[in-house]
Amino acid sequence: MPISDSMPAAAPRHTAVVGLQWGDEGKGKLVDILASDHDFIVRYNGGANAGHTVVVGDERYALHLVPSGILVPGCTCVVANGVVIDPAKILEEIDGLRARNIEVGDNLRISSRAHVVMPYHQALDGALEEFLAGRSGSGAIGTTRRGIGPAYADKVQRSTAIRVNDLLRPKVLEQKLDLICPLREAQLRSLGVPLDDAKVDAAQMLDHALTLGERLSPHVCDTTWLLHDALAADQRILFEGANACLLDVDHGTYPFVTSSNCSTLGIPAGTGVPLGHIDRVLGIMKAYSTRVGGGPFPTELDNAVGDRIREKGREFGTTTGRPRRCGWLDLVAVRYTAMVCGVTGIACTLFDVLGGLDEVQLCIGYRLPDGTVTDRFPADAFDLDTVEPVYETMPGWEDPQDRPTDRDSLPDAARAYLDRVEAFVGVPIEIVGIGPERSEVLVAS
Ligand code: GDP
Ligand code: IMO
Ligand code: MG
């Protein structure tokens, strides 16, 4: 049954789906579920650092740049201007989907304004990480090494950036690469990277980029006008957040963040759709916490419970395969991200993973070095690193024998956990995830 059938009569027209933790909350699954209620599915930030998993029956799809609505016939998927696009990666993804008989044609539109991730961006990303790890031990961010930071840095720097439109203009691209390649070569040499000409030779780079641009060209358009035409035609839009609010470059655990505005605040700049159009913001929150890469994580469980959550939740990165760090649900963090993102409802995913524990803990405050307790999330990683979590302990529950059909059919202790989360965050839980498959959700009536 489509979720729209169980929603109130005046269903919201434009929806944002956003991660409320450090990523991998199950955004891809929720976008896939909600896609059938929308005409356009729009990615507004990030790049191939994202890994969104959608499970349909026995089939598992890992999407990185292509929006997770691509599996739903009739949806137009848009990669908008705020995304940084690795042309080789998105073409590989398109080929992979087509090989599995998923239609990818006019239903995928790519912004001509989006910025391009080039091979030297990836080389720089890796080289900077090595440099930082070697210098300070813990200074490295633990990036996905997909070139995200260097590509956004070029975007802001301006004169050394390449946009998707440039891939379709050989003369402009040639001039840009003649300027950029020697700069990148010098930079990579200074970082001691063994140089592979394919990454910094302007002529080779031009050939490579033009070939990829030609293949992408049928999908490229001005997505700002496309989306405004859709709004004028009263079509429904779903904005798909990548990464998550605690990784937002302005509002996350800086500097251990990614390089874009992954919160809903990134939507206007990343799409050209102005503020005020979105009437539903669904915050995706795992029933516990995970984090990949470096940075403080107050509720991290470096013990058998953490290992158990990792195994049961299959907490290994969709993009890099790295084991995810696991911990208890941090309500201080989630209340903050729900506030920053303007969340109207929560989807609590991976709830099934908590079943079978004797007791569960919820972080409801942070003890500061001076002994006082706060429920306000701090401004950066250095402050977050100094806090001790204050927990509320609740009884655990067994995995139900029969698959639950609604929230009321969950064990008492499980319902009490969800009630406590709602009360603390101040936002209703509209959807509960009880398994990876598309149909494995409980929807509030
Ligand atoms: P995203 O990046 O936010 O889209 O999340 P990922 O796809 O990287 O990670 C979420 C993982 O949890 C994926 O393997 C999903 O298939 C899986 N998943 C999503 N919802 C549920 C759920 O409710 N229960 C379980 N067990 N797995 C889920
Ligand atoms: P989805 O969309 C989890 C993390 C990286 C690293 C930091 C910076 O699947 O939720 P970057 O390569 O972006 O410069 O890395 O951000 N990170 C993610 N962690 N899920 C993601 O995306 C992530 N995207 C970036 O692990 O710590
Ligand atoms: Mg992911």
Image (cartoon, helix red, strand yellow):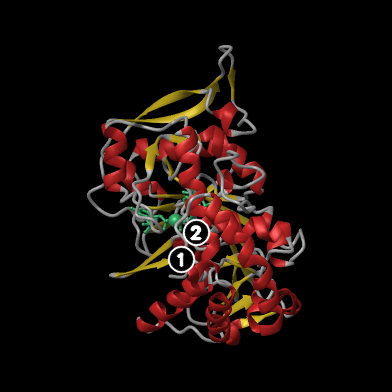
Q: How many marks?
A: 2
Mark 2 or mark 1, which is nearer the start of the sequence? 2
Amino acid at pointer 1: Asp
Amino acid at pointer 2: Ala
Q: Secondary structure at mark 2?
A: helix
Q: Which residue is mark 1?
A: 196
Residue that protrudes farthest toward the left in the picture: 401
**Residue that appears at 62% across and 55% down:** 281
Residue 251 percent coordinates (x, y): 65, 42
**Residue that appears at 57% across and 49% down:** 258
Q: Secondary structure at mark 1?
A: loop
Residue 123 numbered tag: 2
Residue 103 percent coordinates (x, y): 45, 84
Labelled pair 1, 2 in contact (Cβ < 8 Å) = yes
Q: Quadrant of ligand 1?
A: bottom left
Check disc 1: other Cα within 10 Å, few if <14, some if 14-19, many if 20+: few
Check disc 2: other Cα within 10 Å, few if <14, some if 14-19, many if 20+: many
Residue 229 occupies quadrant: bottom right
Please state which of residues 215 and 195 is positioned toward the viewer in this rendering: 195
Left or right of residue 269: residue 128? left
Residue 293 in view in this figure: yes
